Amino acid sequence: MSASYGVILHEIFFGCISTALNMLKILIPLMIIVEILMVYHVMEKVADRLNFLAGALGMQKQSIFPLLVGVVMGVTYGAGTLIEINRRTPIPKGDYVLIGIFMFLCHGIIETAFIFGVAGANILAITVGRLAIAFLVTAIAARLPAFQRMKED
């Protein structure tokens, strides 16, 4: 059983359009919510409450806010926030590496979870799993002897 090229191209084209529209249904409202959260400084308030994570991850307290922004909103917002915060309050080189490790494993957690959710995945399992793995790997990396030497330099 084979389909004609016309049928295949029709399915590819309209399948892509359908998937893109489903993703836009999630991403556009999410981007609006993110902007509202930034305007009302909600992320900063949450970061203040999560300062206890700094010690567990081997970071200083000023590193939690850009990490949180990157995890929730994605690498682009996280990197921009990291650069802006570093201008005001310099972040240690070692914390940059730890933030990079964490964000490599777990960034844009909300948008990614919803995108996978559209595809039928379990959103809770993906979110908790990514956070747990990123937290564990970052905490271990912060305690490695090579990393300790980098933090001293």
Image (cartoon, rainbow, N blue to C red):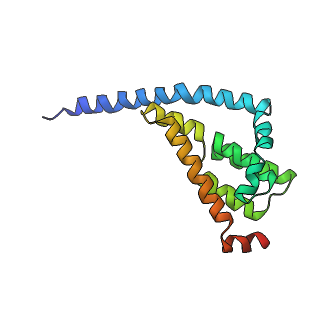
Quarter of the picture holding the C terminus: bottom right
The residue located at (65%, 57%) in the rendering is 100
Tag count:
0
Task: Looking at the picture, tell me which residue is in the foreground, 151 or 3.
Answer: 151
* Residue furthest right in the image: 88
- Horizontal and vertical percent for residue 31? 64, 30
Q: Residue at x 67, y 45 (%)?
A: 70
In-image side of 32 versus 85 (left or right): left
Which residue is farthest left? 1
Asked where in the image residue 92 lies, by quadrant, the reply is bottom right
Of 14 and 126, which appears nearest the observer?
A: 126
What quarter of the picture does the N terminus occupy? top left
Q: Is residue 41 above or below residue 105?
A: above
Please state if 107 lies on the left or on the right of 48 as rendered. left
Residue 117 located left or right of residue 61: left
User: Which sits in the foreground, 136 or 85?
Assistant: 136
Q: Quadrant of residue 49?
A: top right
- Residue 125, percent across and down? 50, 40
Q: Is residue 10 above or below residue 51?
A: above
| Vertical placement of residue 129 versus 32, above or below | below
Vertical order, 144 against 22 (above or below): below
Q: Residue at x 63, y 63 (%)?
A: 140
Expressed as whole percent of the image width and height from the top left, the position of residue 79 reads 70, 49
Left or right: 130, with 42 as reference point = left
Indicate the position of residue 43 as horizontal and vertical percent values.
75, 37
